[in-house]
């Protein structure tokens, strides 16, 4: 284990590698009851009756809960309140939970769950998002009036004139698939009633504050009567938002009604059946290009299958809309994005949040356009990519931070020798069985929530009388190393060793509501709050000791665990300064709040400053394709991203490699398959995630340009690393085989010895 302050330090490393970390399923409570969800085989049906009597009489069963037992609201949602704690009027997808059995043991609860019967009127299911939009299609939510969840649009310039000025047009249709998060730890919650009536919630969830809102609404109690305790989590990748919150709400309901602790621990097949997935997209894309290699116009129609409930479909599709042209300057844009209800499994947040789908489209279209021009994709990108002072497709001028698009592109080209390797690609022809190709993709990604919502975060620094420091931050540790990054930032700002800081895992009752830990906002928002809190503490400490140092408070320096005058002649140790503050009745306790800079958005035109800053990234991959089997073998990959500032460089590299590994699954392996609305691969033995042997050698190039909007200088990285390797692989497969890939995952079979000219699509 690395010592505090060493490169790659993590505060939770020792506990995790020695197995001492207590995850939710490890928590023990006296008189603990266990719960199991009840599903039925329907995909779309009107519920006539949920028959629970036989299950209630089963051995060990304490109670069977249905929608009628919910004292508060049975519906919840972050945007539209259409999600059900328990299905009440209808079953809308095969993962709907109609009841929950609570028993003395988990095995008894599971056995009894099979005894619950649902009497229902089967309804026609709508499983195709395009068909769901047709007049007369079965309605997933009758009260909504249609199957349209939301629309977004961009109207910039005159797209008709832009296409008239084009010397040629590239037009294609693309599809992406439904993807499972495949976190190691399935959903689990343990809820316990306290003597004061408060329900304590421990769970594998990413968002304690939104979980508290959903639980309180379900129970019909004020927020103050629910405390969600930060608990170590075994992976999330965006997947432990709505589903994890509803699992917590069900367990909390049982604990409240029965007056005993209740655990609800999911099996893997329950998790895959019920939890939301990455949105499958259908995209019709049209790009006009002039003879000078400049993009003259883009028109696109994006249809996202949102499944049975809204979840965060409007937010996911909004990001897709904002970034529908990739990191390129396009003066004429016409984009329509539609989120659609179907009776498929729900779609929601997943790492990348609407960007991976669109980057798969855009980064192939630019390569196709470059081929028509007879130039490389690199040259085409250089002619069109955003630069300092460029105006985005939403009308935002990129002048408030460094635009590092060219810097990350150059870094990848230099690291990989890309352009020399590009000349050696097979393009479908090789003497042996292995076809060789390289591919590249790049993106810019809006940081944090942007105009999706109000964005701010709080941090609490509480220095103890002996000089030790307690730190709490309103973001959640999802396994990404956030606690370590926050501790490092506080230590560096205060000029003390990080070993002095004890990160205190917050609950919803100890730190202000700071929103959800999503959108790669953890470091920029949490780190900003920590930095501002530390600066306020320094101000107060400086005022307390400036007399002893014989200088103005504003001139006091913090370094080496001490406070010094400007010349360094006088010194007061950190511990002495804290003792002085307590002696003079000044508490060294501060709250820092970072408020994200203002963003703007006009929903009617798609104009505005969508994000206050952006992350710029580029990735390249080298691979072979076997002509006889179609097997793709990844040889190497490299990525460069402008992270603003790498707070913990080893953890930053971990984000690079983890994001790229997930992207290989998105590109080549992963797909949630369904038949007639029922998932047919509901376990990890049939859902194919990448193996270690599937992964290439990966190289991470950390580019640092401290962001002026960020108090700590850092930006974001968790999602950007995941969103562009799939299109890079698609481009490399084309350069190897001469065949363009328009859907994910990429599936290749045996290739003919000679590729027909008409098959070599641009």
Image: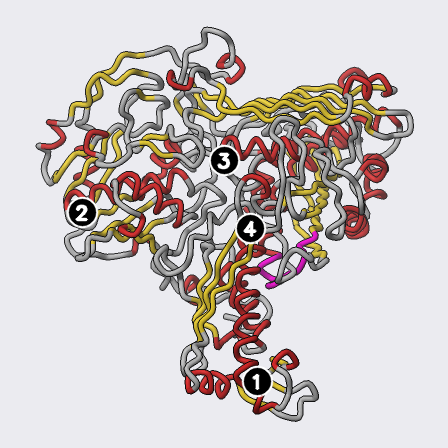
Marks 1/2: CA–CA distance: 52 Å
Q: Is residue 437 above or below residue 741?
A: below
Q: Is residue 689 above or below residue 565?
A: above
Marks 3/2: CA–CA distance: 34 Å
**Label 1's element?**
strand
Q: How many marks?
A: 4
Identify the residue under disc 1. 562
**Residue 479 place in picture, x, y as percent:** 47, 55
Identify the residue under disc 3. 688
Residue 456 falls left or right of residue 613:
left
Q: Residue furthest top?
A: 136
Tag nearer the camera, 1 or 2: 1
Residue 96 falls left or right of residue 472:
left
Question: Going 59% across and 45% down the picture, which residue do you hit?
Answer: 719
**Mark on residue 33?**
2
Question: Going 11% across and 27% down the picture, which residue do you hit?
Answer: 54
Label 4 or label 3, whichever comes before in sequence order: 4
**Image quarter for residue 239?**
top left
Marks 4/2: CA–CA distance: 37 Å
């Amino acid at each position: 284990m690395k010592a505090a302050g060493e490169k790659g330090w993590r505060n939770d490393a020792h506990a995790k590698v020695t197995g001492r970390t207590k995850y939710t399923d490890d928590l023990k409570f006296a008189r603990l009851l266990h719960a199991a969800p009840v599903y039925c085989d329907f995909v779309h049906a009107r519920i006539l009756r949920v028959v629970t009597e036989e299950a209630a009489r089963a051995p060990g069963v304490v109670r069977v809960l249905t929608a009628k037992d919910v004292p508060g609201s049975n519906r919840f949602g972050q945007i539209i309140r259409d999600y059900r704690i328990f299905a009440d009027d209808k079953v809308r997808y095969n993962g709907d939970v109609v009841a929950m059995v609570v028993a003395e043991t988990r095995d008894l609860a599971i056995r009894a769950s099979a005894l619950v019967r649902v009497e229902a009127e089967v309804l026609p299911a709508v499983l195709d998002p395009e068909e769901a939009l047709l007049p007369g299609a079965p309605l997933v939510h009758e009260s909504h009036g249609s199957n349209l969840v939301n629309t977004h649009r961009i109207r910039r310039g005159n797209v008709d004139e832009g296409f008239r000025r084009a010397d040629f047009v590239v037009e294609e249709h693309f599809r992406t698939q439904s993807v499972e998060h495949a976190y190691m730890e399935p959903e689990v919650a343990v809820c316990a009633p306290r003597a004061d009536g408060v329900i304590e919630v421990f769970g594998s969830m990413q968002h304690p504050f939104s979980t508290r809102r959903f639980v309180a609404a379900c129970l019909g109690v004020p927020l103050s009567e629910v405390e969600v305790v930060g608990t170590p989590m075994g992976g999330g990748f965006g997947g432990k938002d709505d589903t994890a919150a509803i699992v917590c709400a069900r367990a909390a309901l049982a604990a409240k009604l029965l007056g005993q602790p209740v655990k609800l621990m999911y099996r893997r097949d329950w998790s895959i059946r019920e939890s939301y997935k990455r949105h499958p997209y259908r995209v019709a894309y049209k790009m006009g290009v002039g003879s000078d290699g400049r993009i003259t116009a883009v028109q696109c129609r994006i249809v996202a299958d949102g499944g049975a409930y809204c979840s965060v479909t409007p937010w996911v599709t909004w990001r897709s809309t904002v970034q529908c042209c990739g990191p390129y300057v396009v003066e004429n844009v016409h984009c329509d994005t539609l989120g659609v209800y179907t009776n498929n499994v729900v779609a929601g947040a997943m790492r990348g949040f609407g960007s991976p789908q669109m980057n798969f489209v855009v980064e192939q279209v630019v390569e196709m356009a470059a081929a028509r021009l007879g130039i490389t994709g690199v040259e085409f990108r250089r002619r069109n990519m955003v630069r300092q002072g460029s105006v985005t497709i939403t009308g935002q001028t990129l002048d408030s931070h460094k635009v590092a698009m060219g810097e990350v592109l150059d870094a990848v080209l230099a690291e990989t020798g890309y352009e020399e390797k590009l000349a050696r690609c097979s393009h479908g022809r090789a003497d042996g069985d292995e076809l060789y190709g390289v591919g590249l993709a790049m993106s810019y990604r809006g940081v944090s929530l942007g105009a999706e919502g109000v964005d701010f975060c709080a941090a609490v620094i509480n220095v103890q009388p002996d000089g030790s420091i307690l730190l709490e931050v309103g973001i959640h540790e999802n396994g990404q190393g956030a606690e370590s990054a926050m501790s490092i930032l506080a230590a560096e700002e205060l000029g003390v060793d990080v070993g002095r800081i004890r990160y205190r895992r917050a609950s919803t009752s100890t730190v202000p509501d700071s929103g959800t830990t999503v959108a790669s906002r953890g470091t920029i928002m949490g780190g900003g709050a920590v930095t501002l809190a530390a600066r306020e503490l320094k101000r107060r400490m400086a005022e307390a000791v400036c007399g002893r140092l014989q200088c103005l408070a504003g001139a006091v320096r913090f370094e080496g665990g001490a406070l010094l005058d400007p010349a360094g002649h006088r010194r007061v140790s950190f511990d002495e300064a804290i003792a002085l503050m307590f002696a003079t009745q000044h508490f060294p306790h501060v709250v820092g709040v970072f408020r994200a800079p203002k963003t703007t958005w006009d929903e009617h035109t798609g104009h505005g400053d969508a994000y206050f800053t952006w992350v710029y990234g580029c990735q390249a991959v080298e691979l072979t394709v076997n002509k006889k089997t179609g097997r793709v073998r990844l040889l190497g990959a490299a990525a460069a991203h402008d992270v603003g500032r790498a707070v913990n460089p080893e953890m930053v590299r971990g984000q690079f490699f983890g994001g790229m590994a997930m992207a290989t699954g998105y590109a080549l392996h992963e797909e949630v398959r369904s038949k007639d609305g029922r998932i047919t691969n509901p376990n990890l033995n049939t859902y194919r995630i990448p193996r270690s042997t599937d992964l290439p050698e990966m190289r991470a190039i950390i580019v640092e340009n401290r962001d002026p909007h960020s108090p700590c200088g850092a930006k974001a990285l968790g999602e950007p690393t995941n969103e562009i390797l799939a299109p890079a692989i698609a481009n490399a497969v084309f350069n190897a085989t001469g065949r363009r890939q328009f859907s994910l995952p990429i599936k290749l079979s045996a290739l003919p010895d000679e590729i027909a000219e008409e098959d070599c699509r641009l």
